[in-house]
Amino acid sequence: MSNKTKSILIIFLVLLADQILKIFIKTHFMLGEEVVIAKNWFIIHFIENNGMAFGMEFGNSIGKYFLSIFRMAAIGALVWYLTKLWKKDVPFGLIACFSLILAGAAGNLIDSAFYGLIFNESHGQVATLFPAGGGYTTFLLGRVVDMFYFPLIEGHFPTWFPLWGGQEFIFFRPVFNVADSSISVGIVAIFLFYRSYFDDKKEAAVAPTAVDEVSEKTSDEPVEQ
């Protein structure tokens, strides 16, 4: 199996898992409903957000449009870069990392682009797929579905702690989804295992410049008669 085929398979499987789980949550849970899987360490908690990964918000409808367009541009850039990597002799792990990032970005874009069109509201009810009355909003203004919640450590900051002294502390507070996880794993793996690949490329780009400078200096020296 070629690197290209394996890359496409990773993207497809991540997207499939992400969308199946989101559609299941959306059609079986009301907003805010949760199921405890392992004590208080692992909870399925259904929320929706208007913005970025891990439940972070990004402005109003104008910000939402901007974020969706940015996602489209990022996905286009990732597709272009992946097609270049497929043709090069690079570690497959690097290709897998970019495939995970692309799949995650595409997964959340699908929510933003289409969920507002194909689902009705989840407030106080379980949403319906393709409802008779239409969706809850227009194209690109849909909300991203999140469900994974891991409040592993709960407590309070010491009173002497700057800014947050005495306030409640939860780790890990953000609620996220498969797409968010895919992006995070891809980025972290690149920094941990493949940073040297980009350092080597930078050195290779600088080296010819240094050789050219030496050549220019040599050619400028007067020739002894």
Image (spheres, grey):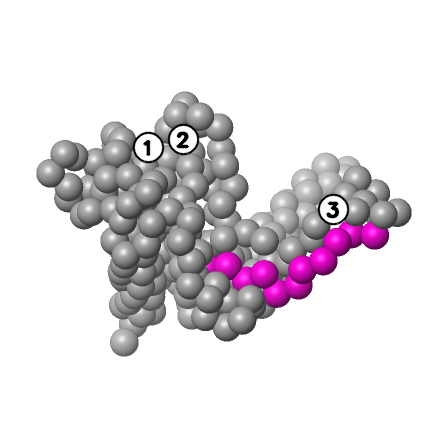
What's the CA distance linking mark 1 and mark 3?
34 Å
Residue under label 1:
141
Question: What segment carries the magenta color?
Answer: 148-158
Q: Which residue lies under the disc numbered 3? A: 167
Residue 144 lies, in percent from the top left, at: 38, 44
Is residue 136 or residue 201 the one in the foreground?
Answer: 136
| SS state under label 3 | loop
Q: Which amino acid does label 3 sit on?
A: Gln
- The residue at 69%/53% (across/down) is 169
Which label's residue is closer to the chain start, 1 or 3? Answer: 1
Q: In which quarter of the image is the C terminus?
A: top right
Distance between the Cα atoms at labels 2 and 3? 31 Å
Circle 2 sits in a helix, a strand or a loop, which is it? helix
**Residue that carries the numbered disc 2 in the rendered image:** 64
**Would residue 112 be found to the left or right of residue 216 on screen?**
left
Quarter occupied by residue 180:
bottom left
Spot occupied by residue 18 in the image (x, y as percentages of width and height): 33, 59
Magenta-drawn stretch contains 141:
no
Q: What residue type is labelled 2?
A: Lys
- At mark 1, the secondary structure is loop
Q: Is residue 152 magenta?
A: yes
